[in-house]
């Protein structure tokens, strides 16, 4: 008798609406949970074998979907390591339990946002034990990315907050003016010294002295200078580490700018980039003085000897003052001296079907057959978007939508109970036929 199929359909309808109520309840409960991805319940009909005469109700089946690809709003915060992602990328993470246990092959998990802070051991983790992962940088702040389709090269990010560091100087930029009157016949020929302080490999201050000696002709002006470079770490005035000669234009078109630079010993010059390369007691150093005819760099004008601009990298010993992440996923340490150094690079993970990821506790996800295999992108490239510090992704739940769905679900549940009540009465009538 087909009336029993109606009874079963009503029961399945109650089950389906109960499942939908469960997802709505979960959504509402997590409407303020950062990074929570809304759940949705879709229904599909069940069809049994039917004849053309009598139809037999098959019922309905609920299917729950987590909308991982639906991003929530970005909320600004005051913590540099509150991290969100601007597009479909996900952050690689693991769990603190596995890190503490010393697991070699750490579980590879994903999340879309997190409020990370260093714990007692320096691991960048959230309150629920989610640990951020990345590729480590070497002592020079250079990151060598590992495999793009495996997570074996990723490490838990660990920051030594009490670290003290010094950075040696390897690059300088110098702009100065040499007095044109010093190369005129009858000038004194006195040398002009430019002292440039730099940091050696131990963070100590050393001095690189550029000694400019004018060439004084018998008549007219030479517009020529000889230069010696003296390193306080090892060299003396009688033993410079490098020397070269310069001449300057006195034409209407290029007057006062560098004309030629002829290298002597211990130095090379790239006229295209304007860089001098020499070796100090602490290693190679590049000094940008400008290219020939470049305005405003190395000049010889009728004015006093004076540097117009000096810049250099490196820093003396100083304590770490903070850590942040930039749009490219680089975790950068700041020091009290103003120096910075890259510590890690956090790649962003992409999968073909984000909605197919397996949901885990703590707004984390795992790769599944439905999601497809992952690929590790550099942040701010490809389809994954960029990493946003001082930011958290809010829940993707829309409370107005959920409350509306709640009313619809209640009505649908009540309607299914009416089916069961009706079938019960019809079966009662059928039973009464025997009386």
Image (tube, rainbow, N blue to C red):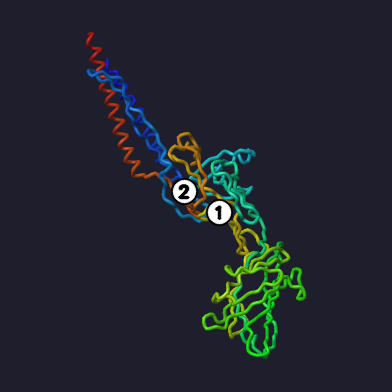
Q: Residues within 10 Å of mark 2 (few under 14, many from 20)?
A: many
Across and down, in percent, residue 365 comes to 49, 39
Looking at the image, residue 319 lies above or below residue 247: above
Horizontal relation, residue 292 to residue 203: left or right: left
- Above or below, comparing residue 191 to residue 155 in the picture: below
Mark 1, secondary structure of its residue: strand
Quarter of the image for the C terminus: give it: top left
Identify the mark at residue 48; answer none if there is no mark.
none
Q: Using the image as rendered, state which of residue 239 and residue 121 is in the foreground.
A: 239
Mark 1 or 2, nearer chain start: 1
Residue furthest top as drawn? 434
The location of residue 283, given as percent across then percent down, is 70, 63
**Rendered-image quadrant of the N terminus:** top left
Please give left or right for residue 50 compared with residue 374 in the image.
left
Q: Give me the residue at 67% from left, 71% from top.
A: 197
Q: Secondary structure at mark 2?
A: loop
For disc 1, the marked residue is 330
Residue annotated with mark 2: 384
């Amino acid at each position: 008798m087909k009336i029993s199929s109606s009874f079963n359909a009503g029961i399945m309808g109650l089950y389906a609406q109960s499942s939908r109520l469960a997802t709505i309840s979960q959504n509402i409960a997590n409407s303020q949970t950062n990074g929570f991805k809304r759940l949705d319940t879709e229904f599909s009909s069940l069809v049994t074998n039917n004849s053309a005469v009598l139809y037999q109700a098959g019922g309905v089946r609920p299917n729950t979907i987590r909308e991982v690809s639906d991003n929530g709003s970005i909320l600004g915060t005051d913590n540099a390591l509150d991290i969100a992602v601007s597009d479909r990328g996900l952050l690689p993470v693991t769990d603190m339990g596995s890190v503490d246990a010393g697991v070699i092959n750490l579980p590879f998990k994903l999340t879309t946002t997190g409020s990370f802070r260093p714990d007692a051991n320096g691991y960048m983790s959230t309150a629920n034990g989610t640990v951020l992962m990345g590729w480590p940088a070497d002592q020079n702040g250079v990151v060598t990315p590992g495999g793009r389709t495996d997570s074996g090269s990723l490490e838990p990010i660990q920051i030594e907050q009490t670290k003290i560091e010094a950075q040696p100087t390897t690059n300088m930029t110098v702009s100065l003016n040499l007095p044109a009157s010093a190369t005129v016949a009858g000038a004194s020929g006195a040398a002009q010294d430019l002292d440039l302080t730099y940091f050696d490999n131990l963070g100590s201050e050393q001095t690189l002295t550029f000694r400019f000696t004018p060439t004084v002709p018998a008549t007219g002006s030479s517009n020529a200078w000889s230069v010696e470079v003296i390193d306080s770490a090892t060299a003396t005035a009688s033993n410079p580490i490098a020397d070269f000669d310069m001449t300057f234009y006195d034409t209407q078109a290029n007057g006062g700018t560098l004309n030629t630079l002829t290298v002597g010993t211990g130095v090379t010059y790239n006229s295209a980039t304007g860089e001098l390369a020499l070796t100090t007691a602490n290693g190679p150093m590049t000094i940008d003085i400008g290219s020939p005819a470049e305005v405003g760099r190395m000049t010889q004008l009728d004015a006093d000897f004076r540097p117009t601009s000096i810049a250099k990298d490196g820093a003396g010993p100083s304590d770490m003052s903070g850590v942040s992440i930039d749009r490219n996923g680089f975790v950068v340490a700041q020091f009290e001296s103003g120096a910075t150094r890259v510590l890690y690079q956090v790649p962003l993970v992409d999968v073909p079907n984000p909605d197919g990821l397996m949901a885990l506790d703590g707004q984390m996800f795992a790769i599944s057959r439905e999601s497809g295999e992952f690929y590790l992108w550099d942040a701010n490239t490809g389809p994954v978007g960029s990493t946003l510090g001082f930011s958290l992704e809010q829940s993707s739940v829309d409370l107005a939508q959920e409350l509306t769905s709640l009313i619809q679900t209640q009505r649908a549940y009540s309607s299914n109970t009416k089916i069961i009540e009706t079938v019960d009465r019809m079966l009662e009538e059928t039973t009464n036929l025997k009386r």
